[in-house]
């Protein structure tokens, strides 16, 4: 029996274990407990876990900037794939975005993650060849210590 609920920081040990063991999930300082806690507090009601009893078998982080939504770390344990869990997590998040008026959502996918790209495109997501992602690191960010 599996079910979906909101993610919370009590999940952290299982989250980081799943992410470390999932291909094509890139981890960074943004995934530290302090920073994940800040993300969840800033984006309430948008990040979910799916469970098999009390074992976390899938995750999705949802956030937004007030204009567009962003999804990170959609991951399903390899032993539980192709059972609809990824789609269920995605649908939960998209419904939550719709509830707060977010009309469009973006996802970053590694260019060589063909399987991931196939998944997103199967669900109606489209690539944006007219756009290029540029990033910049912020020097000395203030760490939120909660
Ligand atoms: C992508 C991922 C989350 C899919 O999870 P999943 O639980 O196996 O997916 P689902 O069972 O919900 O699949 C839903 C639908 O997508 C299809 N699908 C699943 N994975 C697919 C893939 N890699 N390519 C194409 N279609 C795929 C399923 O067949 C299913 O189709 P249906 O609705 O017609 O039956 C999982 O493979 C994963 O964790 N991958 C590694 C991490 C990753 O790449 N994440 C996304 C990149 S950011």
Image (cartoon, rainbow, N blue to C red):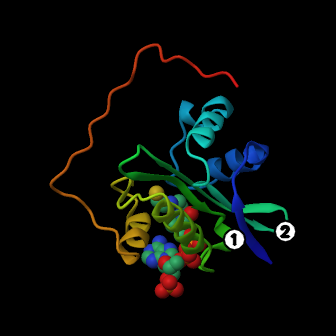
User: Picture coordinates of residue 117 (x, y %)?
Assistant: 38, 65
Q: Relative to residue 90, is residue 122 depicted above or below?
A: below
> Residue 95 — which label?
none
User: Picture coordinates of residue 33 (x, y %)?
Assistant: 68, 33
Q: Are circles 1 and 2 on residues that touch, CB within 8 Å? A: no
What kind of element bears circle 2? Answer: loop
At a point 80% along the width and 61% down the height, the residue shown is 55
Left or right, 38 with respect to 65, comes to right
At a point 21% along the width and 46% down the height, the residue shown is 132
> Residue 79 — which label?
1
At a point 42% along the width and 59% down the height, the residue shown is 101
Q: Mark 2 points at which residue?
A: 53
Nearer-the-camera pick, 137 or 43: 43
| Quadrant housing residue 43 | top right
Compare marks 1 and 2 and give the one earlier in the sequence: 2
Left or right, 60 with respect to 52, comes to left
User: Picture coordinates of residue 113 (x, y %)?
Assistant: 40, 59
Mark 1 Cα shell of 10 Å, populated few (<14), some (14-19), many (≥20): few
Q: Quadrant of the N terminus?
A: bottom right
Mark 2 Cα shell of 10 Å, populated few (<14), some (14-19), many (≥20): few
Residue projecting furthest to the top: 140
Residue projecting furthest to the right: 53
Quote the CA–CA distance across marks 1 and 2: 15 Å
What kind of element bears circle 1? Answer: helix
Q: In which quarter of the image is the C terminus?
A: top right
Q: Relative to residue 53, is residue 128 depicted above or below?
A: above
For discs 1 and 2, the disc positioned in front in the rendered view: 2
**Ligand 1 within 8 A of label 2's CB?**
no
Left or right, 137 with respect to 59, comes to left
Q: Relative to residue 131, is residue 144 depicted above or below?
A: above
User: Picture coordinates of residue 118 (x, y %)?
Assistant: 38, 72
At a point 56% along the width and 39% down the height, the residue shown is 42
């Amino acid at each position: 029996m599996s079910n979906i609920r909101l993610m919370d920081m009590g999940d952290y040990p299982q989250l980081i274990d799943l992410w470390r063991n999932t291909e094509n999930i890139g981890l960074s300082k943004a995934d530290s407990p302090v920073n994940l806690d800040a993300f969840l507090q800033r984006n309430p009601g948008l990040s979910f876990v799916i469970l098999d009893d009390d074992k976390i078998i899938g995750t999705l982080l949802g956030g937004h900037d007030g204009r567009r939504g962003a999804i990170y770390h959609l991951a399903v344990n390899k032993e539980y794939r192709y059972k609809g869990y990824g789609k269920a997590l995605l649908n939960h998040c998209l419904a939550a975005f719709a509830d707060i008026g977010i009309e469009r959502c973006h996802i970053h996918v590694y260019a060589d993650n063909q399987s991931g790209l196939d998944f997103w495109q199967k669900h109606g997501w489209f690539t944006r060849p007219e756009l290029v992602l540029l990033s910049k690191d912020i020097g000395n960010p203030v760490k939120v210590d909660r």
